Amino acid sequence: MKLEVQNVSVSLGQRQIVKEATFSVKAGEFVGIIGPNGSGKTTLLKSLRRLYPVEQGSIAWDSMDINQMSEHDLARRVAYMQQSVNIAFGYKAEDIVMMARYPYLKWWEQERKEDKAIVEEAMKSVGVWHLRDRSMQALSGGERQRVFLAKALAQQTDALLLDEPTAALDLVYADDIFYESRRLCDKGKTIGIVVHDLELAAKYCTTLILMSDGHIVSTGSPKDVLTAEHLHQAFHLNAAVYEDPYFKQQRIYIFPRNMVDDLVHNCVDTVHSCVDVYNKSCSNAHYDKEEDLV
């Protein structure tokens, strides 16, 4: 499902949070929205689901303006997982995930056999099926996050918007969420995700949108967006960005803020020299067994 965002601005109260954002997303892309705290990432994501009204500009999914779509139709096309949700006492995990099937039911209809199968599949895919009869109040923060992700998956939309889904997860589950998301994109689903882990975003996302103070600083492939210059512009930090030759993955080394500029530049040169040596050693190395990589 493709997305077109044209000159979009969003204000909350008297403050403009997103400022003249313009970008396009092709169907099947995994888009990471990155940037410092307060840069407008979540506000932008919510506007893509019409949870916040746009002050100016337009947003279109598959050439359909979201303001011309009914809530029922939009719910069948775009799912949204928010950062945190207050759940009333008594709801079981399976009850929460089943709510994702309501856009497909008439108001008088009960859940069908196929709905129950879809919910089971979604919960199993994120490892929470064994928690289906547990109260949401009894789950840990990470378990609750995975239940809400299962709910978003059970909605079976062509587009999925995730607001920091890995915030309360350990490293293994966080990587699993990104791996599963990339797999879904490879099958045609379009996913937008707000993420703070830049290396995880670089590892799995096909496109990145870097924001700062409500503006889009850069958009494109991870290699094009994650540069030392762009990171300095958005985060006001000094960093060295290099590629791990083993796994062909971008790595980022952030220098302490109190380092003076000359020292930082010298350190950057040293890091680049070390990376060159590492690259050469890897290219010259031969591994006969998989165990040699451990």
Image (cartoon, rainbow, N blue to C red):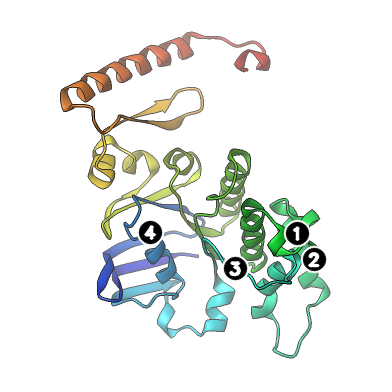
Q: In the displayed structure, does residue 79 sit left or right of residue 43?
A: right
Q: Give the Cα separation between the discs numbered 3 and 2.
A: 16 Å
Q: In the displayed structure, does residue 147 sit left or right of residue 270?
A: right
Q: Amino acid at mark 4?
A: Lys
Q: Which residue is mark 2?
A: 117
Query: Which image quarter: residue 151?
Result: bottom right
Secondary structure at numbered mark 1 = helix
Q: Amino acid at mark 1?
A: Glu
At x 26% / y 57%, what residue is drawn?
213
Disc marking residue 99:
none
At x 23% / y 44%, what residue is drawn?
233
Disc marking residue 121:
1
Task: Report the mark closest to the observer, 4 or 2.
Answer: 4
Q: Which residue is mark 3?
A: 157
In percent of width and height, residue 186 lies at 57, 50
Q: Residue at the right extreme?
A: 113
Q: Give the Cα separation between the discs numbered 4 and 1.
A: 30 Å
Return the residue nearer the eye: 13 or 215.
13
Q: In the displayed structure, does residue 261 sit left or right of residue 179?
A: left
In percent of width and height, residue 56 lies at 27, 76
